[in-house]
Image (cartoon, rainbow, N blue to C red):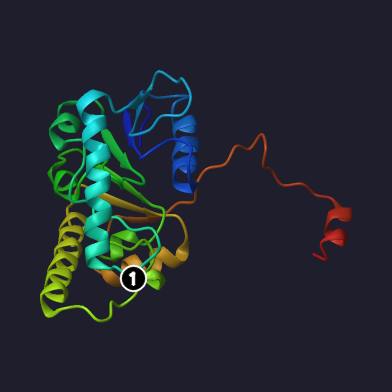
């Protein structure tokens, strides 16, 4: 990324949750030397460059969130962990494509922010920061949380399988696009992504940034003794 390239960050919010805080730290780093916008469904703070959904889009996001939860319960009713179906969203690909910003950086985009269908239509380069394994699963953010449903009718099982397959196929099509760059935050997710998509070239391992004013190496023999290092 060169200094003259501008960035649009997209995350559900800029504070609540690990992914949101990581996105906010990245925004803080990038905003020091380039044009940048941060688009969220829910805004914390008063930074004018953080754009919160307004009016109809915010209302639509709330409704889409409720629908998303219902769809997830239909697909995996016994799963009590966080899930995202991303069938509907308030941000459109058209508005992103019309913007003057060069690169789109996606973070946690669930709960009615942007749908998979709209992501597929984005024409700009997409840098997708993977905070979990959601891109590998139909709706679950980690494979370990997937729970098989019991005592369901054949019709509901059929609907569930169709919806799951639809989500997986939609994600595969997006990942295979040449304008999509995947950023893995740890080597475990990187390994799983490369196994799932062996022909995908644009996969990178980049850790979340931290403020070096607060976190820095300290050589101290007392610390080594205290923690038995």
Mark 1 — residue?
78
Tell me if 102 is positioned left or right of 121 in this view: right
Count of numbered tags: 1
Work out whether 102 lies above or below 129: above
**Circle 1 crowding by C-alpha within 10 Å: few under 14, some 14–19, many from 20:** few
Place of residue 105 in the rendered image (x, y in percent of width and height, measured from the top left): 32, 40
Q: Nearer the viewer, residue 156 or 82?
A: 156
Place of residue 33 in the rendered image (x, y in percent of width and height, measured from the top left): 44, 24
Place of residue 172 in the rendered image (x, y in percent of width and height, measured from the top left): 19, 62
Place of residue 73 in the rendered image (x, y in percent of width and height, measured from the top left): 27, 62
Q: Nearer the viewer, residue 71 or 45?
A: 71
Q: Quadrant of residue 154?
A: bottom left
Q: Quadrant of residue 50?
A: top left
Name the residue rendered at 32%, 67% in the picture: 194
Name the residue rendered at 35%, 37% in the picture: 1
Q: Quadrant of residue 54?
A: top left
Tell me if 174 is positioned left or right of 133 in this view: left
SS under mark 1? loop
Quarter holding the C terminus is bottom right
Name the residue rendered at 38%, 28% in the picture: 3
Q: Nearer the viewer, residue 48 or 33?
A: 48
């Amino acid at each position: 990324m060169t200094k003259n390239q501008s960035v649009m960050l997209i995350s559900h919010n800029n504070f609540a949750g690990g992914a949101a805080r990581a996105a906010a730290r990245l925004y803080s780093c990038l905003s020091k030397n380039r044009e940048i916008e941060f688009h969220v469904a829910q805004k914390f703070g008063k930074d004018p460059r953080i754009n919160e959904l307004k009016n109809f889009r915010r209302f639509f996001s709330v409704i889409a969130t409720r629908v998303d939860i219902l769809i997830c319960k239909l697909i995996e009713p016994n799963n009590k962990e966080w899930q995202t179906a991303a069938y509907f969203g308030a941000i459109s690909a058209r508005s992103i494509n019309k913007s003057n910003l060069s690169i789109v950086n996606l973070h946690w985009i669930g709960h009615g922010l942007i749908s998979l269908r709209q992501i597929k239509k984005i024409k700009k380069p997409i840098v997708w920061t993977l905070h979990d394994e959601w891109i590998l699963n139909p709706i679950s953010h980690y494979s370990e949380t997937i729970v098989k449903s019991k005592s369901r009718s054949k019709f509901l099982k059929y609907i569930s399988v169709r919806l799951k397959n639809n989500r997986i196929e939609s994600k595969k099509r997006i990942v295979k696009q040449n304008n999509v760059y995947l950023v893995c935050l740890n080597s475990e997710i990187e390994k799983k992504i490369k196994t799932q998509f062996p022909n995908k070239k644009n996969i990178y391992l980049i850790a979340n940034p931290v403020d070096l004013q607060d976190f820095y190496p300290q050589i101290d023999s007392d610390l080594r003794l205290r923690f038995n290092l």
